[in-house]
Every structure is written in C-alpha cells, then in structure tokens.
Amino acid sequence: MRKLLLGVAFAMIASVAQADFTMIVPQKPGGGTSVWAEIVAKELEKYLGEKINITHIPGARDIPGFDTWHNEMRNDDKVIMVSHGGNGVSFLQENVAYDYRQYESIGLMNLNIIAGKQIGVDLDYGGIRFAAGSGMVPEAFAMTMLVCGPDKTIDEYVQCFKENVTWVSGMSGSERRLAFRRGELNGTRENPAAYKKHVEQDENAEIWFHHGILQADGTHADDPNYPGYQFEELFFKRWGSRPSGAFYDAYKLVKSFRDGMQKALWVNKDNPNAKKLQDALTDMSNNPQSRSIIEKKVGKYEWKIGADGNAHRDTLMTLVTVEALEDLVYFNTNALGLKSLFKVELGLK
C-alpha cells in the first residue's frame, strides 16, 4: 500500500506543469496540517505568482512523507516540505531519515498547544482521565509535574503518574473529542485551530494550561491568545517554586520541538527558489487580509521566516542534551508505554 501511495504521489508531481510548486503534506487530507497547508498555499499563491499543488504522503505517525521528501524529493527545486509537531517529536525519539539541520526554512508559525478540562474539576490534584498518544507526551509531562510537584526522581515521577492519571489508549481524534464532551475523559488537548473549534465551543469545558511560546533565548512566554495559563506560571502558583531539573528539561525539550515545529515549510539548502518563497511568505504574513484569513483559523501567532526560521530551528537544537533525551525515552517507555529510541548521537552534537 505504501509503495502504491508513493507511486501515485510521484506521478502527481511529475504531471503538474513545470512552473508549479508542490507542497508535500505527510498526512491524509482533512488532518490539521493538511487543512493549514491548504489555507497557506491558497494565500501564498497570490504573492508567489505561481500555482502550488498539494500532494499527500500519509503513513505511520506521519513519518513516511517527511522521509520520502528527504530521501527522494528535496533536490527538486520546486518541492516544499510541510512538517508539523509530530515530526518534531519523532525526530527526537524515532529512527527517521529527515534532519532539520540540513534544510532551509521558508517559514513557520511559532505555535502552542492548549490543554482543556471539564469545568470545576481540579486536575492539578490528580484523578486525570486523558487520551493516550505520542502527540500527548508533553501534556503527560506537564500534568505529572503539576500533580506531583518538584524535586522528584524520574522513577518517582513515573510512579506518581501511574497513581494519578488514567492514560486511555486506542482512541482516534474524533473518539477522544466525543469522550471529552461526554465527560468520560476530563482532560483534553488541541492545537490552536482545533481548540477554537472543539473546546472553546464546549459549554462544559475551560482552559487547563498551555505550554507557552518559544523565545529566541530558549525560554517560553505566555500565549497572548490564552493569557495567564502558561504551565510554568501555574506550577509556581501550585508549588511556590519554578519547575527545574532533569525531568523539566526533558519536558521542555519535547514540548518545544512539537509546538515550535507545528507548522513549518522547508526546502533543501541552496534551493535557488528559497528567497522567492521567503519573500512571498513575508508579503503574505504582512498583508492584513491574508493574515486575517489564517488567524481566524489558528489564532494570532508570529511567523518566523527565512533566517528567523533557521534561528528558531537552531534554538531548538540547543535544548537537545543526552540527559534530556534519556529522561524523555525513560518516561515514554515506563510511564506511557510508548516505544522510543534513545538517540544519544543527537545530544552529542
């Protein structure tokens, strides 16, 4: 099936006009990144002056699309890769071919993930019922620290998680959202667009926490769309100190890669069309009408384009340490039951 999908994708790319650009989206149509890519491509065309076609290459955890672009398409000057937060998490803990350090950033939106809860339920004290999934790893870290407090060993955090969180496996996105509306789950999380659509409209739901917006120095700032709910600030109110230590560093690593890479556009280094694409994206992001169309869907978040996108990637790489990777894999394996690879070589570079 995968070979058939790849064959169809290559045929589609070969069939478009030579002047057209192609965006590779590593998931099926209808997914969050697919919808975002469709909106951005439609707006970007207005400033690029050329058609942008979208090709979907889905697969397990959205890895095959990115790997295929890296191995077989990135030297095509008219092909753009659309990556998202799940690719960022996989880069840290799975055997993937792609490597952000080898690419030129066209641009990205510096986004966030928002966690919601049932109104009136104080989940900071335990009793959490939450849908499992590799995309929920940062939420698992955050809720563990909120409930369990500072100065714990990794094994103590694993045990505390198991005592306070019911981690429900096997739910699709639609099943997870339905279970939350019914009250079968009392916590949930969504990207900004999905949060606006699925949680803000729920009269029985309210915000729990968010992860903050990555800054150039590696810190995180409050989200102006959801002020006052940043994890670090809620932790301080609950425990009287700032989160710190190895477990927090592992959380900071995985949440930063997932949220900071949620919606990003890449080409290969030395792509002759890079500046043209970056200039068009700059014009799009500065146009009030185009910006309004995108912000209506996802909220008001900053674009980082060209050199700023590359610097954002470089900031993320400073968070990668051997200890943070080791604790990430240990918690994934022993608390969440996720298969994870300890990629020590990332922390040594």
Image (tube, helix red, strand yellow):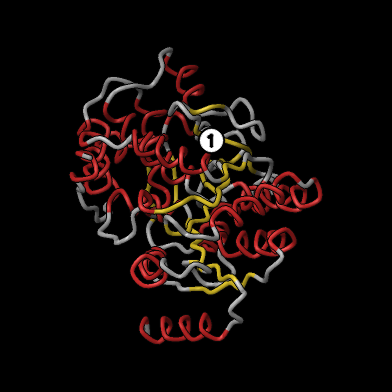
Most foreground residue, 156 or 35: 35
Q: Indicate whether 161 appears above or below 133.
A: above
Q: Indicate whether 94 appears above or below 156.
A: below
- The quadrant in which residue 327 appears is top left
What residue sits 19% from the left and 45% below the top?
345
Judge the density around disc 1: few (<14), some (14-19), many (≥20) Cα neighbours within 10 Å: many
> Which quadrant does the N terminus fall into?
bottom left
> Where residue 168 sits: x, y (%)?
39, 54
Residue 194 visible to the viewer: yes
| Mark count | 1
> Where residue 9 sits: x, y (%)?
47, 81
Residue 132 visible to the viewer: no
> Where residue 89 sits: x, y (%)?
37, 50
- Secondary structure found at label 1: strand
Amino acid tagged 1: His
Most foreground residue, 39 or 118: 39
Q: Residue furthest top?
A: 240
Most foreground residue, 107 or 60: 107
What residue sits 39% from the left and 55% below the top?
133
Q: Indicate whether 105 appears above or below 234.
A: below
Q: Is residue 180 left or right of residue 249?
A: right
Residue carrying label 1: 210
What residue sits 53% from the left and 28% below the top?
230
> Where residue 229 sits: x, y (%)?
57, 28
Q: Is residue 89 left or right of residue 36?
A: left
What residue sits 46% from the left and 43% below the top?
310
> Which quadrant does the C terminus fall into?
top left
